[in-house]
Image (tube, grey):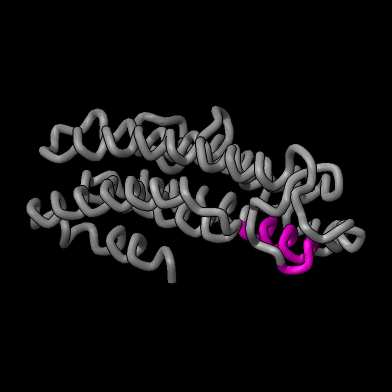
Amino acid sequence: MVTAGVFLIIRCSPLFECVPSVLSFIVLIGAATAFMAATSGLLQNDLKKVIAYSTCSQLGYMIFVCGLSGYTASLFHLSTHAFFKALLFLSAGAVIHAVAGEQDMRKFGGLARMLPYTYAAFFVGSIALMGVPFLSGFYSKDLILEVAGGSAALPADFAYSLGLISAFFTSFYSFRLLYLAFYGESRSARVPLEHTHELSSRMAVALLVLAFGSVFLGILGRDLFVGPGTDF
């Protein structure tokens, strides 16, 4: 349901191309969504809310690049985002399950030592979301910013500026999440966290598959999605 709107715009692109004013409106709404959701994510302390606002922000990227006629770039980010965001949500579920349902990141701390596999999966998903070079999020998000930076459409500069600021905010709240949840000493009021446990083997396999897509889908699919001028 979350990505249905993006997919609908991509599939109906011939209709949108007939109405430039609507495309400009899509750019404005998408860029504002990316920025506002990113700023909201900065201030959240609930683990799942941070990831949820991040999802909303990334959808803003997908929407505004559709308004700039970059439909393949939008679909590319839609595909890569599916992997690393699913990885983050499942990893968050594993963390919440391990700490008996607690979701406030301020009460975590030091979980990297107790949940090393979950931490590794969370770390991969987070740096892919940040757009660290050579991971899948880097290729798709960078392509969106390239389309915005090189577009001659009137609202493109607006989208490009908010997209860059939102990318910085994304990196900030992703690192904040990692730091509060996994680094330092435990801040839990429950003494001690003796019931904290690692996830099951079946869950571990699912996270491994998603981590593989989060790392390699960008470099494997970039020629497919970029299109003309590539080796594909």
Question: Is residue 92 part of the magenta span, yes or no?
Answer: yes
Q: Quadrant of the N terminus?
A: bottom left
Majority secondary structure in the magenta region:
helix
- Residue 140 visible at all: yes
Q: Residue at x 46, y 30 (%)?
A: 231
Residue 32 vs residue 136, the one in the foreground:
32
Residue furthest toward the bottom? 1
Question: Is residue 157 part of the magenta span, yes or no?
Answer: no
Tell me residue 63's x, y (percent): 30, 53
Question: Which picture quadrant has residue 146?
Answer: top left
Q: Residue at x 35, y 38 (%)?
A: 144
Task: Describe residue 34's horizontal placement relative to residue 100 as left or right.
Answer: left
Q: Residue at x 41, y 30 (%)?
A: 230
State how many labels appear. Answer: 0
Tell me residue 160's x, y (percent): 27, 34
Q: Residue at x 69, y 47 (%)?
A: 181
Q: Is residue 227 above or below residue 115?
A: above
Tell me residue 218's x, y (percent): 54, 39
- Residue 124 visible at all: no
Task: Describe residue 50's horizontal placement relative to residue 199 as left or right.
Answer: left
Tell me residue 172's x, y (percent): 51, 36
Residue 167 vs residue 66, the one in the foreground:
167
Question: Which picture quadrant has residue 102?
Answer: bottom right
Residue 24 vs residue 52, the one in the foreground:
52
User: What stretch of residues is rendered in magenta?
Assistant: 89-101
Residue 141 vs residue 223, the one in the foreground:
141
